[in-house]
Structure formats: C-alpha cells, structure tokens
Amino acid sequence: MASSTAAKKEIIDFLWEWSDSHGDWGKMLVDLIIKTEAPLQQAERQSIFDNFLDSLRSIKQLPTLSFTKPTYSPTSKTIELNCLKNVTGVNKLAKNQSLTFSKNITVIYGQNGTGKTGYGRILKSLGFSYDTNNTIHHNILGVRQPKSAIVEYTVNGVSTSFHWNASAKSPDLTNLSVFNNHCVQASLEDRHLIVSPIGFHLFNLVSGELVELSSLLRNKVAAHPVSISWMDFLHSGTQQQKFMERLSKASTEQELLTLSTYSLGDEAELQKKQTELSSLNQELLRTQIRNLNTQNEELNNVLIRVRYAESILNTENWSKLKDLNSKIIELSLKTQKGIKEIVIGKGIEFYETREFNSFIAAADKYLKLLNKPDYPAQNEVCLYCRQPLESAARDLLLQYKILLNDKTQETLQQSILQQNTLIDSIKSIENNLTFTSPVFGLDDNEKAIQPLLIQQYNKIISTFKEKVVKNLIEEVPLFDLAYSEYVTFLELEMNRIMDLLVAKNTTLQGLAEAELQLKSESDELLDRKFLSTKMEEIKLVIQNMKIVSVLNSKVGEFNTASISRKTSEAREELVRLNFNLLFQKELKALRKGDIKIDLNFGTERGSSKITQRINAYGLADILSEGEQKAIALAEFLTELQLDNIKAPVIFDDPVNSLDHRIIDEVGKRLIELSKTRQVIIFTHSILLLNSLIQQSELDTSKQAGIRFLFHSVSKNSNETGIIGEVEEINSFSNYKKKLEKILESKPNGRTETSLAIEGYGHLRSAMEICVEESILKRTIIRYRKSVAFPALLRVEGSKLDQHKSDLNDIYEKCCVSIAGHSSPTEIHTDPTLQELRDDYDAFKSIRSHFTN
C-alpha cells in the first residue's frame, strides 16, 4: 500500500543516490515512480529500456536526457466506512441486514457462531493483514448463491460505494487493515512489514520495475538468436565444423569467407574424389578376411582333436590294454579253478559263469553286513532259509568264504576297472572329423571338400575303436598310427591361411588409409559447399553474439540487490529507531514492557523485513499465548503509526487469551486509536464490551467527541448475522419481552412445564437487573470494575428492608423451578404457567415501588 509519514531526511535522497550509479535511465525510472507511485505503464517501461539500450551504443540514437532531483509529497487521505449491506452468499449471513459504522469506534458483539466472523471476512478480503488467508465459503448447508455485498464509504469526505463480489478489489479499500487471531503466529515469524513506511513503497516499486526491465532484457537477448540448428549436418573434424563449433563474437567474416568459398573447380574435385572413394572395395576384403579366420579356427579345432587322440590312442596305451587283457584272463582262470576244486562232486551247475561268481560274492557281502565274521559256526542255521546246516553244507560255505577273501578276486576287479577306464577314454576320441568351411575348396554341389588324408585318419581311428570295443585287440599285432603325418598336414594348411590373412590385412590397411584420406578431403569440400549457402545466416549469428555479449554483461544493472542495499540504508536512518520507540511504547501500554525483544530489520526485493528474537529464541517458542497476543497487537499498532493514509482498522476478537487488566488497556488503546482513524471491533468478550460501554459513558470520551456505536449480532435456526441493539442483550426490557411472550404463547408442541421453566429463567434475569439498576441504583454492575459510590446515596434502604424478603422468596422460586430435579433431597413440583404469571405480577408490584 502507498503510505508514508513525515521523515527527517527526504526519501528521495536515497532513491536519487541509487539512480546516480545507473545512468540517465535510472534517473528516468526514479522520476516516473515518484510521479505515479504505481507500477509503470508498458510504454513508460519500454522508454526506460530504450534509453538503457542507447547507453550501450557508441553512437547515441536517442535525445540526451536531463533530470533534476524530483520532490516527493507523500500521498495522504482519510477513508471511513459508512455501511456494509446487501450481503448474499457468505456463510449463513442473513439477507437485508445493514451494518453501520461510527466515525470513531464501532463494536459488534455476539456469541460464537452468530455471524461476526462472516462480516469480518468480507472486510478482510478488501484490505491487508498478517493473515493472508482470504477464503470465504458460501452457506455449505444451504443453496449456493453468488457472493456479493455493498460497501459504502468516504474518501476525504467524498461518499462512494463499492460492489464486492469476492474477487474485485477497490484501490481505496485495500488500505483497510485487519487483525485477527490468525495474525498472532504470522506476526511473530520473520516477515515483511505489512505497511510500507515513509514512502518505502517507492523502493518496492523500483525493485518491481527492475524485475520487469530484466524481463525486457531477456526478451531482447532472445530476439537475437545465437543457436544454429544445422550443426549436425557438418562432418566431424573438418575445418568448417571446427570453425562453427567455436563460433563466437570474436569470429571474423574473413575467416568465414576463407572456409566457405566454393568454386566450379571445387565441385569437379568433389566429384572426382567421390568416384575414387566408391571404387575402393574394402568390404570384399573384410569378407575374405572373416572367411579365412573361420577356416583357420576350424583347422585349429581339428588339430586339437588329433592331438587329443594321440594322447590317448597310442603305442603305450595299446600295449597297456593288451597287458590288462592277458592279466584279466589269467586271474579269471585262477578264480574259476578255485571254484571248480570246491564244487567238484557237489553237483553245483554253471559254477564257471559270471552269474555264479556274482552270487557267492553277494552272499559274502551280506554276511559282512550282518557282522558274522565266524559264520558258519557249529550248529549254525542257514541265514537264507533258517534251516539247520548239515556238516557238508557248512564245509562248503567255509570254502566259499576262504575263496572270496583271496586277493585274486580283488586284483581281478582292479584290472577290469583300469581296462574299462582306458576303453572309455578311447571311445571319446572323435572319428568323424569334417570341415564345414571351404578350407580345401567346394565340390560341384557347393559343399566343403573333405581331404583324403583326414578321411583316412577317420577310418583308421574307427577301426582301432572297433577292436577295442569288441575286445579284439589281439588281432592287431602292432599299433602303427602315424599322428605326425596328420599334424603336419593340418599345420601346413594353417600356415598357408595365416600367410593369406597377413597379405589381405596389409592390403586392407592401405585401402583404409586411402579411404580415410579421400573421405577427409571429400568431407572438407562438402562442408565448404554447405557453408557457402549459409554465409548470411552465420554473419547474422556472429553479429547477434556480439550484441548478446554486451547485453549479458549488463544483466547486473537490473539486479535488485543494489536497491535493497539502498533500502537498508534508508530504513536504518528513517525507520528502525522510530519503530523501536513506538513498539516499546505500545508494549508498555499493554503491560508487557518487561519483555525485552530484539528487533532486526532486513531487505528483500526492496521490501523491509523484520525478525524478532529473545536471546536468539523465536517468540512463539517461549512466550505464553497471552503474551504472544499482546506482542502481536503491539507490532500491529506500531506499524499503523508508520502509515500516513488513515484507513479503518478492523479487530476480530482482539482480547482472546488476555486477562481482564490487559482487556481494559486494549480497550483504552483502541479508543485512543479511533481519534485518528476509524476502529471496528468484532468481539464475543462481555468484559471488553462492558469496558468499552463504560468508557463511552465517561465525560472524557464525550468531551473528546468520540462517537461510539454498539451492535449485537444473533442467529436463528437458519441464519446468522442478525443485527440488533447491543443494549438489549442484558436489559430489563429484553427479559420482560421474553417473559411476556412465554406467558402469551400456547404450548403448541411444548409442555407447560418446559415453558414455565424457561419463563422463570427470564424472570430471574429480570430480577437481577432490577436489583442492579432500580434497587441499588447501578452502584455495582456485573462485568464492570469498581463501585459507583455516588450512586450509593440514591439507594432507598427502607424500601429495600420492606420488600427484600418477598423478592428473595420469588428469586428462590425461580432458582428451584429452573434447577428441576437437581436436588434429590427435595420434593420437586413442576412449575405451571399460572404460578409464573402470579410470581411475575408480584415482582412487578414490588419493582414499582423503586421505579416510581
């Protein structure tokens, strides 16, 4: 908000000092801001930017500017609210209500949920506050209606009105300030000042314009593109590609001309080199090399298999195999001979077979499993059929046992194992070595030719393997396979292929170098030809780079840090000391002067920031709720004094969490504030209400011409915000009306007892007010401090003595009727409307003695 107060030093001095370091365009900016006190028009902003650009040119294009330091008179005006009416669509506020405002102080009193906050939210949405939440809901339990209201107000005495619709803003009403419970936490945190003091809004305006000018500078830079979209079309490593890669403001047109001139001769040279390049058949060579590598690998695999065969199927192993055969035959005969000697004459058949030998061997193993080393002993039974053993049978079993434990059998098994192992290794030898690649050429069917020597090798290996498998090795008197002949054959062929590979790789390398050279020369000519079509575009990019370089070097001109520093200087001299003095004064007025708070100020984008600490701790962390409320109020009242525009101040329940002593002080402070600006208070505190009513009745307030206006707000079942006279809330006439309405009504759905109980409640309240006002002559009144001793002289003691007993009886009847069955020791009788009417008549008769 645009505002200021009187200052010892002109605010313009600080702004003009800032403009001195920013040339004529800076002076032009400050001059326009001071004249308008508002954000600049786009044309004005563009004019400043044009002068900034002109300052960068070696030859000026715009007329020379001349400025003298301007003068500044702070805006000053008084705004007063007259009425808030025709509210629709806000919470449950009733229609056709008119909330009027006094010139000085207006109090709107009501209990929670009666609509005070709804009216307050409308006013808050128009102005400013520590609490930035301006959400206003419709009647969520009813039909949604458009939000609207009429605000009637005056500016410097001139009447006007504003149609509020929850979004539109009035420039005048933005100066309204609002303090509510949500403001407390926000106030105690690090924040911006809500009031811009002593014209400090000018710094904020300058800061905002610097941001806008910075945006214009970015747009100007963007209007001079320096990127090139076709860089990928150039060939890596050419002179042209390197030139474009390092293109900058320092690049010259001469260098560009050298690299992009393209003649008819260059075109002919390009065609020649591309023809030579296409004639190089490197791919064929690479295919041949791949094929030779495949053939060489296959030869090597065959050679490995031949050498493997040589390591197994050789003269030494062949002789070993023969020896094992002879040994096995010999041991088998010995084993069979032993059996024959044992079973001869016993009638044992097929004793020479392998099955018989396996049978008695298995029997011996079974005995060992049963742990029967002495079996068969004398009188032993057969372990297989459990029948007694005859002597001959036992002798035969003992002979079998002796034979089986002879080492001949064990040696036989070991020899057989060795023989089988050697035979298995011979079986693993490949005897079908073939070539799938054309190592030795292709036949008529385009299949790889198999060399006769390798075919012969396969046949010989097959023969040897067959003899071994069929155990016919004795048919071969001598092992005569000459492996060296096959190895030599394969190695010679591998050497021949290696020689071919070396030759072809040498040829390929030469072709690659030739291709590389031709390609490099061809790429150079292609890029030269391409650049020849882009010369004008490149020249423009170089020119743009020079302009952008200059513009980017001046980005700091629009940085807000310099104006923030100047704001800090002005704030230190014009604000800090004044703010501290005012703040301490407000704290003392609210009985919180003993709290020592460290205030520090800073600047952010031209706006003043404030931080509050107590011994480096945040206030919200260590203070009670009441202390926080008082300090937030003190800060709010301090900031208002920095504002030269006198606009209404709205307080929504300003005394929550405050004790009764501070409530009185707050009331007095708000009355004092109302002498300079309109004050509007929404409250549900009966203490604050009666404190303000009491103050309004003092001669000092009347002599000062302070106008008080008190409203009440109430609700019915469907609506809130019903405006009435606040005096009726606790008056004899109010309770008299309610009581008589009860007596005149018919039950109509309610019991007579419930109506009578409600009536006795109103009668009791009426009697209490009668005692305060008519009998004790307002000597002592509830919710007020002190005793009005001069009124004590008006009390008629003789009449009081005459009627106090009857009054007390009626009052006790009221209390008993209201209490119902609360006392179990008493016999309760339900009150009736006739009893109520009789007691009311009796009370009126007594009261008449004190009112006449």
Image (cartoon, grey):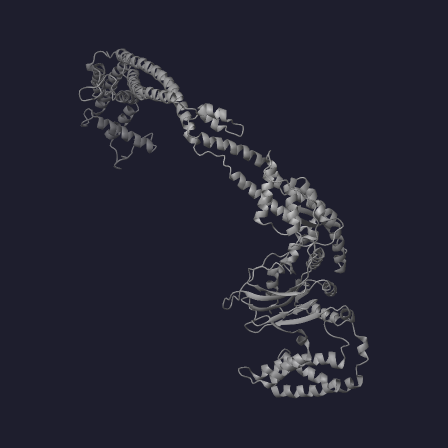
- Which quarter of the picture shows residue 327? top left
Above or below, comparing residue 649 to residue 431 in the picture? below
Q: Position of residue 520 (x, y in %)?
A: 40, 21
- Asked where in the image residue 334 lies, by quadrant, the reply is top left
Q: Is residue 604 visible?
A: no
Nearer-the-camera pick, 401 or 767: 767
Viewer-side residue, 65 vs 444 = 65
Is residue 159 or residue 274 the one in the foreground? 159
Figure quadrant of the N terminus: bottom right
Query: Where 694 falls versus 212 (above or below)?
Result: below
The residue nearer to you, when weighing 244 against 297, is: 244
- Percent x, y for residue 105? 70, 67
* Residue ranking furthest to the front: 63
Q: Position of residue 19 (x, y in %)?
A: 67, 42
Q: Residue at position x 49%, y 27% from top? A: 253
Residue at 77% x, 84% y is 800
Can residue 9 be seen here? Answer: yes
Indicate the position of residue 553 as horizontal and vertical percent values.
59, 35
Q: Quadrant of the C terminus?
A: bottom right
Relative vertical location of residue 144 with respect to residue 733 in this rendering, above or below: above
- Left or right of residue 169, residue 639 in this image: right
